[in-house]
Image (cartoon, helix red, strand yellow):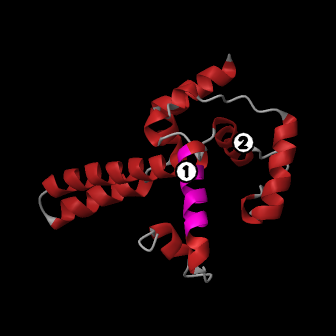
Amino acid sequence: FGESVILEGVSEDIVIKEEDKEPICTSIHYILTNCSPPPTSLNLVDVKAKVDKSQVKEMEAMVQSQAVILKPESDKDEALLKILIMGENNHFPLLTYLVDTYHRYRLLKYQELYDQLDKKEGQKQKLKFIGKKFHKGVNLTDFMKKCHALQEINRKKKT
C-alpha cells in the first residue's frame, strides 16, 4: 500500500493514517474492478442515446450543485447535459472520451498539415500555405461529420 499511486495523489491534499491505507486501497480496488467496464469493451456505436426530460432536469440540478461552469446559459441548450446523461446511462465518461477523441483528431489534422507544409519549398510558399490552411482551422463540425461512432449515434437517435 505504500506504493499506491492513488494514495500518493490523495495524500497530497489530506493526511491518511497508516491503519486507514489498507481499507482505502481495498475499497478503491473494488470500485475500479466492479463498477466500470474496461475501456476496451466500450463501443460507441452501441451507446443508448435516448434521454428523457426528467433525466435532463435531474442532470441540470446535479450540474448546478457540482459543476456550475458546465451549466448551459440557455434553458434550450441541453446538448452538454445530454452527453453527460448518455455517459451516465452507459456507465462511462462519454464527455471525456469525446473531448479526448476530438483533440486526437485535431492533432492528427495538424500533423497532416505540418507534413504538407514541410513539402513546400521557400518561405513565401509556406506563408501562403499557412494562411490558406490554418486560417480555416480544424472545426468541430468537420470532426462530427467524419466520426463513425457519432454518425451511428445520430442515426440511432433519428430512428
Q: Which residues are magenta?
A: 22-33
* Residue in the image at 77% along x and 47% along y: 77
Say what amino acid the circle numbered 2 marks: Ile
Residue 122 falls inside the magenta stretch: no
Q: Is residue 157 above or below residue 67?
A: above
Foreground disc of the pair 1, 2:
1
121 is higher (above) or lower (below) than 37: below
Q: Residues within 10 Å of mark 2 (few under 14, many from 20)?
A: many
Please name the residue shown 63% across and 40% down the image.
Answer: 91
Q: Quadrant of residue 110?
A: bottom left
The x, y position of residue 67, in whole percent, is 74, 63
Q: Which element carries disc 1, helix, strand or loop?
A: helix
Name, please, the residue furthest toward the front: 19
Q: Quadrant of residue 2?
A: bottom left
Q: Which mark identifies residue 32?
A: 1
**In the figure, is residue 75 to the left or right of 36?**
right
Q: Position of residue 98 (x, y in %)?
A: 53, 46
Examine the rendering and report whether any part of residue 74 can be seen: no
Residue linked to disc 2: 85
